[in-house]
Image (cartoon, rainbow, N blue to C red):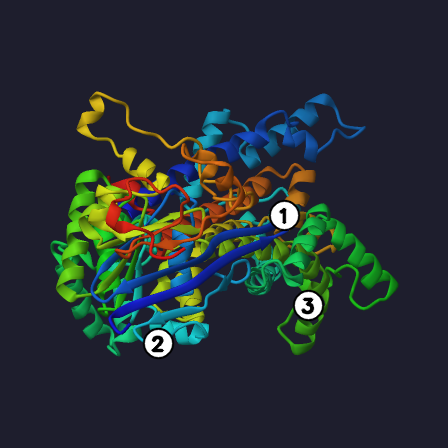
């Protein structure tokens, strides 16, 4: 699989504590093809953010324990990389855009200096060269008057500008892979659209692979090629974006899509998924979703359904998939 | 840092100074006996008239013969010439001379103490934060519980008794001659160090632990901030993250407590000075208090509070240099 930028196999993250073991991520596999945008979607608490941090190897151990069979970035397996080796990778080959730009930027450092750091660290530049590069990077993401903005502190910028700064920082060294963890959740809807445009433009123009982590399916619809739906630490469905929106198979995905308000909702209320994601310390037996699922049977409460691959490459973890079209017969049990 | 901000802070400090000066003048005058009577108690063979004359002369001599308001005006007028007045002590020494004589001896204790507290406290705190949850951290937590329950003067008494009287390792209390006969000779300096050891140790134990605890909490709080994760995601090494991102942010609350310690440099050691018979500002203030020496009392108090005002002003200005967010409220 040469065209894969990132290949993750059997990623597990657990947090042992006095009460027992908190299983945040339970053996997930996913692939990100080169130059494509892949999204991981799920409710808060399903393990999305932990997954993104695990790929960067940024989880502190203790408390976190990470196990992975394969973590291959563009041919190099990062599985056994030490923290020192990862420092060469972070910022240069993989970088990250965080959710809340107010807290993700150092409040006592000018934004220019914070971007300079990436160039100085990885670009072998001195301070003056780094600043020139920083101003260019800010210009690319549409920050007006980048030269004077670079000397401002995070609190002097608006939310949208701060998020652009984070994007500029992530793209600084044109890494191979960018992980965007809820990049627009903290923003107003109008600003959200602008920031997504910038992010999407940058990704396409520079052919960077993007891993988008979000709970917001409307964000995914415009950006991602492939979507992984995650529930309580497991992948429950994988599909191309169009297929997922047209024919969601997993009852959880159907619930997620149903909870997006539409204009037609004036007539009928939009669907809610009852309850919340189970606490990662007290997960139900069988399928983790069965207590909230309207299609669940006795089998669902006893056995965890395996992740099955359908003929067209979709994957689903469910005994009672919905909306299955004829030609999608299950490839193998 | 904007000029307007600095200007406002300075004006504010001056305003506070006037309030302090006024309170400082009136508080000693509430409900205290006539200083003239206090200083010249009626003698047995003295007639009423004779005694009245003596009192009158004393009042005139010290400026108590006019109305309180007039006294206040006179006080302010004298202060504007940096004249703190003369003490009631025999020989009428100038208050400013007395302060100048005692101040260095207090500073010997308090400045050394502050330097020890900062250097040891901040390093211990950083270690505890680094080794969070391990024995170093637990030890600090236990130490801070114990030291909260043990006030400095208690430690001072214990040290003075065991190390001073019992083991005779250090002088248990200071001979006043040490100060009057100090001549910068090597021998004299050695004596001062030996005498200062116990007071400084008893003052610094609590300070070290509270600075360590403060630093530890502050560093840990900053370590959990999102921007530390951002810094690490840029590929910075642990060391770079620590120096460039963590410590600078963690120092902000510490700067506030340093400012508070500095404002207490002069008046903070009254009891310790008393225990070790150390003739500094603290003992001077107690002497003034117990002898109703108004001018001295007022002089010492005004000096202590002005020092605190200046220290606070400097801290605030330093803080706004370190944390660019501070001045924002002023501008918007």
Residue A160 visible, this orientation:
no
Residue A193 visible, this orientation:
yes
Image quadrant in which you'd find residue B185: bottom right
Which chain is indicated by disc 3? B
Compare residues B119 and A310 and report the one nearer the observer: A310
Compare residues A128 and A69 and report the one nearer the observer: A69
Please state the horizontal and vertical placement of residue A163, each as a whole percent of the image.
24, 51
B253 to the left or right of B131? left
Q: Do labels 1 and 3 share a chain?
A: no
Which mark's residue is nearer the viewer, 3 or 2? 2
Residue underneath mark 2: A76
- Secondary structure at badge 3 equals helix
Give the residue at x 32% y 40%. Answer: A322
Residue underneath mark 3: B192
Give the residue at x 56% y 65%. Answer: B123
Which chain is indicated by disc 2? A
Q: What is the residue that sits farthest to the right in this orientation?
A: B166
């Amino acid at each position: 699989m040469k065209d894969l930028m990132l290949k993750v196999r059997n990623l597990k993250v657990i947090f042992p504590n006095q009460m027992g073991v908190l299983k945040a991520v339970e053996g997930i596999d996913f692939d990100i093809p080169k130059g494509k945008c892949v999204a991981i979607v799920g409710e808060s608490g399903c393990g999305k953010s932990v997954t993104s941090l695990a790929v960067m190897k940024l989880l502190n151990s203790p408390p976190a324990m990470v196990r992975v069979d394969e973590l291959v970035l563009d041919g190099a397996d990062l599985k056994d990389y030490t923290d020192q080796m990862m420092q060469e990778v972070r910022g240069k080959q993989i970088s990250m855009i965080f959710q809340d730009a107010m807290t993700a930027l150092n409040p006592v450092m000018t934004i220019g200096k914070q971007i300079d750091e990436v160039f100085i660290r990885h670009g072998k530049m001195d301070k003056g060269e780094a600043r020139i590069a920083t101003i260019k990077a800010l210009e690319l993401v549409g920050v007006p008057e980048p030269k004077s903005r670079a000397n401002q502190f995070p609190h002097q910028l608006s939310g949208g500008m701060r998020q652009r700064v984070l994007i500029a920082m992530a793209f600084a060294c044109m890494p191979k892979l960018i992980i965007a963890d809820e990049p627009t959740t903290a923003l107003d809807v109008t600003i959200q659209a602008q920031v997504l445009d910038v992010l999407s433009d940058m990704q396409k123009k520079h052919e960077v692979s993007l891993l988008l982590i979000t709970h917001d399916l409307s964000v995914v619809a415009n950006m991602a090629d492939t979507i992984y739906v995650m529930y309580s630490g497991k992948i429950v469905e994988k599909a191309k974006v169009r297929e997922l929106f047209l024919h969601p198979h997993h009852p959880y995905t159907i619930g997620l899509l149903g909870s997006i308000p539409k204009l037609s909702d004036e007539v009928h209320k939009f669907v809610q998924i009852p309850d919340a994601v189970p606490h990662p310390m007290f997960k139900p037996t069988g399928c983790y979703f069965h207590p909230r699922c309207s299609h669940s049977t006795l089998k669902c409460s006893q056995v965890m359904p395996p992740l099955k691959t359908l003929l067209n490459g979709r994957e689903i973890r469910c005994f009672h998939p919905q909306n299955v079209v004829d030609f999608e017969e299950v490839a193998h049990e | 840092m904007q000029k307007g901000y600095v200007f406002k802070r300075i004006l504010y400090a001056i305003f506070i100074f006037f309030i302090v000066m006024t309170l400082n003048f009136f508080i000693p005058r509430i409900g205290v006996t006539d200083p003239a009577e206090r200083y010249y108690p009626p003698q047995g063979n003295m007639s009423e008239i004779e005694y009245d004359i003596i009192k009158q002369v004393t009042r005139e001599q010290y400026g108590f013969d006019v109305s309180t308001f007039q006294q206040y005006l006179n006080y302010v007028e004298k202060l504007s010439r940096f004249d703190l007045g003369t003490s009631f002590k025999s020989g009428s020494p100038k208050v400013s001379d007395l302060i100048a004589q005692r101040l260095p001896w207090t500073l010997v204790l308090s400045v050394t103490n502050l330097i020890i507290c900062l250097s040891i406290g901040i390093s211990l705190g950083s270690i505890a934060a680094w080794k969070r949850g391990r024995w170093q951290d637990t030890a600090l937590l236990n130490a801070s519980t114990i030291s909260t329950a043990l006030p400095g003067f208690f430690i001072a008494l214990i040290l003075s008794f065991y190390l001073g009287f019992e083991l005779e390792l250090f002088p248990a209390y200071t001979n006043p001659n040490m100060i009057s006969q100090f001549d910068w000779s090597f021998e004299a300096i050695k004596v001062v160090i030996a005498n200062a050891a116990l007071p400084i140790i008893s003052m610094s134990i609590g300070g070290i632990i509270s600075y360590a605890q403060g630093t530890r909490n502050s560093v840990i709080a900053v370590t959990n901030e999102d921007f530390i994760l951002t810094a690490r995601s840029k590929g910075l090494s642990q060391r770079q993250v620590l120096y460039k991102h963590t410590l600078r942010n963690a120092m902000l609350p510490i700067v506030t407590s340093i400012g508070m310690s500095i404002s207490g440099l002069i008046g903070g050691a009254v009891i310790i000075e008393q225990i070790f018979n150390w003739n500094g500002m603290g003992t001077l203030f107690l002497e003034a208090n117990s002898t109703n020496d108004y001018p001295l009392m007022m002089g010492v108090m005004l000096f202590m509070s002005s020092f605190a005002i200046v220290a606070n002003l400097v801290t605030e200005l330093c803080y706004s240099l370190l944390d660019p967010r501070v001045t924002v409220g002023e501008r918007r």
